[in-house]
Amino acid sequence: MTTMPARIVHVSIARNWSEVYAFAARPENMPLWASGLAAGLTREGQDWIADGGPVGNVRVRFAEDNGFGVIDHSVTMPDGLVVRNALRVVPNGDGAEVMFTLLRLPGMDDAAFEADATHVARDLQTLKTLLEKDGEN
């Protein structure tokens, strides 16, 4: 397989990076900010099952808790395709930078890639709004 085009979609969050990681890495919290998982996740062994909408249920496996801010996860589609997603939370001064590496999958046209990037940016903005509001209390 050739190297796929990639785009880093990111957002700065005015909250300690370890607090951002602790919240964002919990699969139970993801429906609050990751719209693709809005229907929720159900634990099944080491994996989580999510309603993938029109494609059916998808299987999600997350990186184990770690001190590096890594929230990587693989999504296995009903047809067996595995999409590996790199998601990181890193220190940025007193706050955090959350970065998602969006890969342009084979066969994806420009419009679909842009739509995915917009979708990820919107989700990261939701995470920012949620955590900065929550951090005021």
Image (cartoon, grey):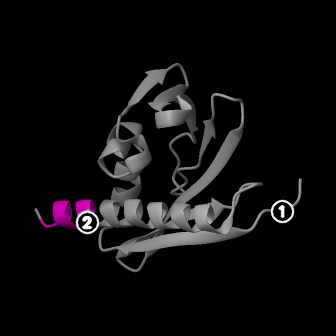
At 39% from the left edge and 59% from the top edge, which residue is drawn? Answer: 123
Q: Amino acid at mark 2?
A: Thr
Disc sitting over residue 100 in the figure: none
Q: Quadrant of residue 105?
A: bottom right
Regarding residue 52, the answer to whether it shows in the image is no
Disc sitting over residue 3 in the figure: 1
Q: Secondary structure at mark 2?
A: helix
Disc sitting over residue 129 in the figure: 2
Q: Is residue 58 left or right of residue 123?
A: right
Q: Nearer the viewer, residue 81 or 134?
A: 81
Q: Amino acid at mark 1?
A: Thr
Q: How far apart are labels 1 and 2 at the CA level?
A: 34 Å
Q: Nearer the viewer, residue 125 or 78?
A: 78
- Farthest residue, direction right: 1
Q: Secondary structure at mark 1?
A: loop
- Farthest residue, direction left: 137
Ranked by sequence position, the earlier of labels 1 and 2 is: 1
